[in-house]
Amino acid sequence: MTQTPHLTGAVRDGCLELAAAGSWTAGHANELELLVEDVARQSTSAESATINMREIAAFDTYGAWLLERLGRAWQAHGREVHVLELPKRYEGVLAEMHATNRKTERKPTSENRLVRALETTGRTVAGLGRDLVVFVNMLGALGEALIKVLRRPRTFRLTSAVHHLDRVAWQAVPIILLITFLIGGIIAQQGFFHFRKFGADAYVVDMVGILVLREIGVLIVAIMVAGRSGSSYTAELGSMKMREEIDALRTMGVDPVEILLLPRVIALVLALPLLTFLGSMAALYGGGLVAWAYGGMAPEIFIARLREAISVTHFEVGMIKAPFMALAIGVVACSEGLKVEGSAESLGLQTTTSVVKSIFLVIVLDGLFAIFFASIGM
Amino acid sequence: MPTAASPVEPAICVRDLVVGFGDHIVLDHLSLDVHRGEILGFVGGSGSGKSVLLRTIIGLLPKRQGSIEVLGINMDEAGDRERHAIERRWGVLFQQGALFSSLTALQNVQFPMREYLDLSDRLLREIALAKLEMVGLDAGDGDKLPAELSGGMTKRVALARALALDPEIVFLDEPTSGLDPIAAGDFDELIKTLQQTLGLTVFMVTHDLESLNAVCDRVAALADGRVIAAGPMAEMLRSQHPWMNAYFQGKRAHVLARTPSRLGA
């Protein structure tokens, strides 16, 4: 049904006479463009040109546009162009194409690469400042909602909070236990392997105990929670924002911060200390097990050494950090979620940003706490 | 692509179609012809299965029985290659536009062209801009993302994308829903003009009595899983079927009495 397009002709009496044939359609647009370009480039002395369309087998917007383009190219050189004997049913398409692509396009202004790099840097720095404002803003909004709820406890969405607590705490228990158990075991194994060279086997217990209770336990759990629950908060809130659900709540006079964000953040703030406690215990258990199997240290000795090496202070240091980290994760997750705009891409971007930012903040917070606890002698 | 085919040759021929979900039968031995070069308006109550028929014809839903022939090819017997060739010859405008949210309007229109045709960048850009202008958009709108477009513009971009490959058949799923009467009227007119200039066959699922009256050559009505009537609008208005009466003679249909066919059939 489709035929190769043709465009052939000769100069007669100072007039270029062309005859078109074949299918001038989308399927042949590629060959057709070459054909048309070829003819357009021919520098003939002809003052005018005619294109006879009688023989064409099919014609669509692609063919029509290329014919139009050829006409325009010639007209730009001051030649007259006439299209002859175009079958009636195709006239509409050509007329339609005649009206399009009339505006001259503005070329994108090419900028200096250095300027662009500086601009990007500037925008990033300004963005950091804005992020800080957004963070403080969200913290304030949550605080306000909390005060409102404390004044009228009946308005607190207990069901929602419990539901989220189930999701971020209870359902996270198996994976948190497994990972912290393994980390505890790995620390103990590395400790034995290297400390043995100095005959300092016994101090492995000190290292495992202090490291797990003060730093690793809470840090690993916070990072896990940021990846697991922070991302899901952002995605949930983001898709609610996309589908105008949050706007709908506002119009009903319901504060989305109070009913969506507060229960989520409270659930997170409760969940993280619980998970940290469980995670730390699992890590110590893992350490103890490795000490027994790999280091040849009997469990009773491990426990006795542990009792000497660590105090409640170490445990407190770890646990105090947990709710603050949870708050940071929750605030970042919520504010990133509310930044989502229309597209699916934006949802993905904000979810990624949320996880990256909350993990970064968790580590920064950990550093600040380390300085703080060191200076108060804890 | 307008062809010299006789106007009564069916572009789509549906016979004894049965479609259901679980034990719920939506389409029950439905038969329907869409002639080449016509605009067929397909009406029916909400949830009666209009969109189901559309989605079954374009192959998004499985059928239990019956046959569907598109442009003379039985879709069941067609091999992968034939199916692909047919898919190139139709365009679909989904109810919500279904624009790819991460691509600009222009890139959305270019998407099918990139997939199916091997075009130079220049031609790709020019044709896509031409299509956007054909549906009444500005070249400047081409760089906008779907999220930045209004409802009417989204439908226009979606129509431009449906027309990207110069299809012979266009499926429109409620093209004017969610548009104000002026925008809906403009859109109807646009469909009519494009159908005439490009020689399209249009299968239009709609609720809009105004657009049925203004642009459709024929109307088919769906009730109880079957086509209960098909024919020109005037015939529909004369029908004695209770559902048809309620639909075409109801309160909201009184506008039809006042406004005779605006664009002519």
Image: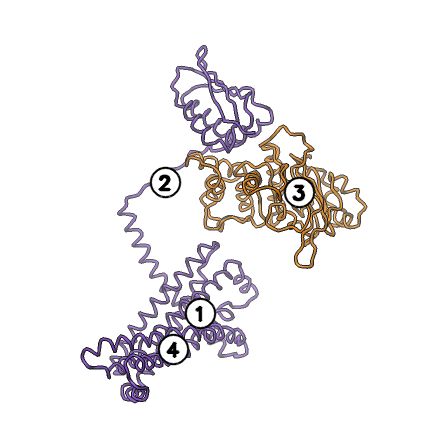
> Residue at the location (52% across, 21% down)?
A83
**Same subunit: marks 1 and 2:** yes
Secondary structure under badge 4? helix
Secondary structure under badge 1? helix
Q: Quadrant of residue A34?
A: top left
**Residue A279: numbered disc:** 4
Amino acid on which disc 4 is placed = Gly
The subunit carrying tag 2 is A
**Depth check, front residue: B58 or A192:** A192
Residue that label 1 marks: A141
Disc nearer the start of the sequence (1/2):
2
Q: How many marks?
A: 4
> Residue at the location (32% across, 70% down)?
A363
Q: Is residue A368 above or below residue B232?
A: below
Residue that label 2 marks: A108
Task: Please tell me whether mark 4 or mark 3 is closer to you in this view.
Answer: 4
Quadrant (top left/top right/bottom left/bottom right) for the C terminus of chain A: bottom left
Quadrant (top left/top right/bottom left/bottom right) for the N terminus of chain A: top right
Amino acid on which disc 3 is placed = Ser
Q: Quadrant of residue A288?
A: bottom left
Task: Please tell me whether mark 1 or mark 2 is closer to you in this view.
Answer: 2
